[in-house]
Amino acid sequence: KKKNRKGRWVKHTVYVKDPISVTGMSTNEDVLNYYIQHKPSVEANPDRRYSYCNTNYALLALVVERVTGQSFPQYLKENLFGPLGMEDSYVFSLADTARYVPSYQYNKRPYPLEKLDAVYGDKNVYSTVRDLLKWDRALYQGTYVSLETLEQSFEPQSHEHGGVRNYGYGWHLMVDPNAPKVVYHNGWWHGNNAAFRRLINDTATIIVLGNKFNPNIWRAGNMGIVFNALADTSEPAE
């Protein structure tokens, strides 16, 4: 609020034009071009602060495309989904917008398509619990990624703050000296949210998917108590 000429307090609204608004559906190339054009400032120096960044995964998908000469969706279809028999998995892209099936908010209101919905790498893998279990089995068996390489990805890399929570190469980690290591990753986009928790000492995995936002999906990861026999200190599911 501000005072008018008569000294009365009135509501004052300031409209600021957004110079970086994107119209239409954006792609990974648009993300890259945005960074080239606007050169966002650095958030922190290396090894000073951990910050999960979706943008890096969108850029990684572009790296895959440059190296392979294929689109990221096609590359995963031929080199991941096909070989592992994941017949109900694909990467959603601009070509799929005409057959978009909405996810839902907690109150059952559908999410419409938004400008970042065609960007992949950070999201947009549509799959099923059964397909993700096939991928998980391949990881445990070392038939898709070598066990040596996988073990390197499970090593903590984020040491800015002490504690049992850490981050490896693409995986969240629970590294508690009094309990087996837990490798996991939750996910969210629009109303879709997911829990994927691997109890690697027991060769067990908890996979929960949903297309209507529900925080209990994330809490489902606490079912790991069945395997580690530790006291469950999590909040009860609503």
Image (spheres, helix red, strand yellow):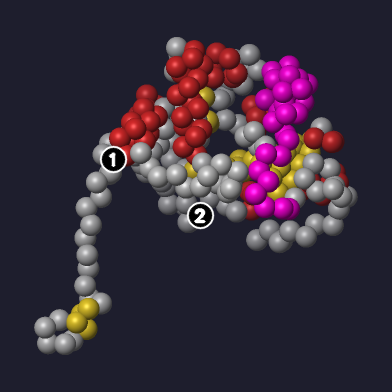
Q: Split into 4 quadrants, where in the image is the C terminus?
A: bottom right
Label 2: which secondary element: loop
Instruction: Give the alpha-carbon distance from disc 1 to disc 2, as whole Å.
Output: 27 Å
How far from the left and from the top, in percent, is residue 192? 52, 43
Q: Quadrant of residue 23?
A: top left
Q: Which stretch appears magenta?
A: 135-163
User: Outermost residue, bottom direction?
Assistant: 7
Query: Is residue 79 at least partly visible in the picture?
Result: yes
- Residue at position x 22%, y 78% from top? 2
Which of the two residues, 197 or 13, is positioned nearer the viewer here?
13
Q: Which residue is mark 1?
A: 22
Mark 2: amino acid: Tyr
Q: Residue at x 65, y 17 (%)?
A: 84
Q: Residue at x 60, y 31 (%)?
A: 128
What amino acid is labelled 1 in the image? Val
How far across and how far down the image is residue 94, in percent? 37, 27
In this rendering, would 94 be left or right of 194? left
Tags 1 and 2 in contact by the CB under 8 Å rule? no
> Which one is earlier in the sequence, the residue at label 1 or at label 2?
1
Numbered badge on residue 106:
2
